[in-house]
Amino acid sequence: KQEVTQIPAALSVPEGENLVLNCSFTDSAIYNLQWFRQDPGKGLTSLLLIQSSQREQTSGRLNASLDKSSGRSTLYIAASQPGDSATYLCAVKSGGTSYGKLTFGQGTILTVHP
Amino acid sequence: GEEVAQTPKHLVRGEGQKAKLYCAPIKGHSYVFWYQQVLKNEFKFLISFQNENVFDETGMPKERFSAKCLPNSPCSLEIQATKLEDSAVYFCASSRPPGAGSFYEQYFGPGTRLTVT
């Protein structure tokens, strides 16, 4: 059974800092990995999707890396802003089918203060 | 539409009452997924559909939960005889069919918050 863990559970940083969120998964036979953002009381916004054959994906100030063999992914946020404050969720789609379910981590609650 | 739509936004039911939630996937998407979020960030997969066919129902508590995706209608998730523990936010997601440009990404709706009192 796939298990996904995110650390830290919460992070508070001053504006402008670069930061790293970590995600680990127990079964390396994944199809892809998605990073999401969730604002309080809102749905999920997909930030980045990394296919199992890829090592990293970039979008603006966000960079996600994937090391499938060690079961790890990191989300790097450059020059953080107060608007980045949200919960960040990592979810993996395990191997076998491209339309499989996602298994989510518990999330990292990020607060960026001015 | 270009977004996954879920209705209602909020639903309050007394324990033992029925609850029915609706999801309209993005136009052209053929896969629909239901997830339950309890205790802030704990997501649990419930069921998925390929068009109107059940694809994976391994997460469904079958004794009280049922779901359908019928042609030309929103998908639905129904809970018979709700319990306090069913209080959660229920998210629907959809994915494109196989083809060029499809990375099987799941796009999520805003969720329906169910409160059972």
Image (tube, helix red, strand yellow):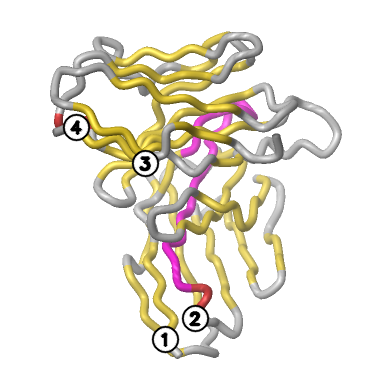
Which residue type carries mark 3? Phe
Chain that bears disc 3: B
What residue sits right under mark 2 in the picture? A82
Q: CA distance from mark 3 to mark 4?
A: 18 Å
The single residue placed furthest to the right in the displayed view is: B100
A19 relative position to B8: left or right: right
Q: Secondary structure at mark 4?
A: strand
A13 relative position to A52: left or right: left
- Mark 2 Cα shell of 10 Å, populated few (<14), some (14-19), many (≥20): some
- Range of residues picked out in magenta: A85-102
Residue B43 on the magenta segment: no
| x and y percentages locating residue B69 in the rendered image | 55, 14
What residue sits right under mark 4 in the picture? B116
Q: Which mark is residue A113?
A: 1
| Marks 3 and 4, the one that precedes in the sequence | 3
Q: Where does the C terminus of chain A fall, quadrant-wise?
A: bottom left
For the residue pair B38 and A66, the one nearer the viewer reads as: B38
Which residue type carries mark 1? His
Q: Secondary structure at mark 3?
A: strand
**Residues tagged 3 and 4 counted as in contact (Cβ below 8 A):** no
